[in-house]
């Protein structure tokens, strides 16, 4: 087998579809827009009230007080909106990072030659469709592995009495070790490879 040392010459692909998972993306776009717009609207209403109070009493002291009030409103409003958006971002990333973390543990378990014990996602987790497809793929691979182990057992049982030469017995021994590895992967414990992600 030769190793290709040439760099990949894949063409540059321009993505034109931005809403890949419209339900998920639109839900969070609208929530972020509502939080940002609501925060700006609140600051605007409070600034308008400060401005109107200045117009009712246009003394030099009221002008200074109104300017300071607008400055404070702008600063506190920006900090408030930033804080709300940060908390919202934390919740969103937790709902997305949790399933990604769990699936990365499952992949590590698969890479170690075992099948993970699948568990459902938390109630408010995102990426449910992706996780369901991932779980279905793991189940199908596990079923195929079980079928292959069953077929190997039949072959070994059928050819066992016929294996009279040393080479034939060695081949059956190899088939037996493959069957044992498949069974262990299917039935073996994950030994605590998954932790709760609450």
Image: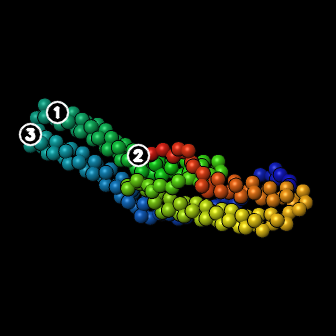
**Which residue is drawn at the image coordinates 31% and 55% (left, top)?**
34
In which image quadrant can residue 164 be found? bottom right
Nearer to us of marks 3 and 2 is 2
Q: Secondary structure at mark 1?
A: helix
- Indicate which disc, 1 or 2, sits on the residue closer to the N terminus: 1
In the image, 34 versus 121, the foreground residue is 121
Q: Is residue 78 visible?
A: no
Q: Quadrant of the C terminus?
A: top left
Task: Please give the residue where the numbered disc 1 appears in the rendered image.
Answer: 65
Would you call the spot at circle 3 few (<14 residues within 10 Å), some (14-19), or many (20 or more)? few
**Which residue is drawn at the image coordinates 68% and 65% (left, top)?**
150
x, y percent for residue 51: 17, 43
Nearer to us of marks 1 and 3 is 1
Q: Secondary structure at mark 2?
A: loop
Q: Secondary structure at mark 3?
A: loop
- Indicate which disc, 3 or 2, sits on the residue closer to the N terminus: 3
For the residues marked 3 and 2, what is the alpha-carbon distance in whole angstroms?
55 Å
Task: Please give the residue where the numbered disc 3 appears in the rendered image.
Answer: 57
Task: Please give the residue where the numbered disc 2 appears in the rendered image.
Answer: 198
Most extreme residue toward the left is: 57
Would you call the spot at circle 1 few (<14 residues within 10 Å), some (14-19), or many (20 or more)? some
x, y percent for residue 188: 60, 51
In the image, 190 versus 53, the foreground residue is 190
In which image quadrant can residue 85 be found? top left
Q: Is residue 174 left or right of residue 142?
A: right
Q: Is residue 193 left or right of residue 61?
A: right
- Indicate which disc, 1 or 3, sits on the residue closer to the N terminus: 3
């Amino acid at each position: 087998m030769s190793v290709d040392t040439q760099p990949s010459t894949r063409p540059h692909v321009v993505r034109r579809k931005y809403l890949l998972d419209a339900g998920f993306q639109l839900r969070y776009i609208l929530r972020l827009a509502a939080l940002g717009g609501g925060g700006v609207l609140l600051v605007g209403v409070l600034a308008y009230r400060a401005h109107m109070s200045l117009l009712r009493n246009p003394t030099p002291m009221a002008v200074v007080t109104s300017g300071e009030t607008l400055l404070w409103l702008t600063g506190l409003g920006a900090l408030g909106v930033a804080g709300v958006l940060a908390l919202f971002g934390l919740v969103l990333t937790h709902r997305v990072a949790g399933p990604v973390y769990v699936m990365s543990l499952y992949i590590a378990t698969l890479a170690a030659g075992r099948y993970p014990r699948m568990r459902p996602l938390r109630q408010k987790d995102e990426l449910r469709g992706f996780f369901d497809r991932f779980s279905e793929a793991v189940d199908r691979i596990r079923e195929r592995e079980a079928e292959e182990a069953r077929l190997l057992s039949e072959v070994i049982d059928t050819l066992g009495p016929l294996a009279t030469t040393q080479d034939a017995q060695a081949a059956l021994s190899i088939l037996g070790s493959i069957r044992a590895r498949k069974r262990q992967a299917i039935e073996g414990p994950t030994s605590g490879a998954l932790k709760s992600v609450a």
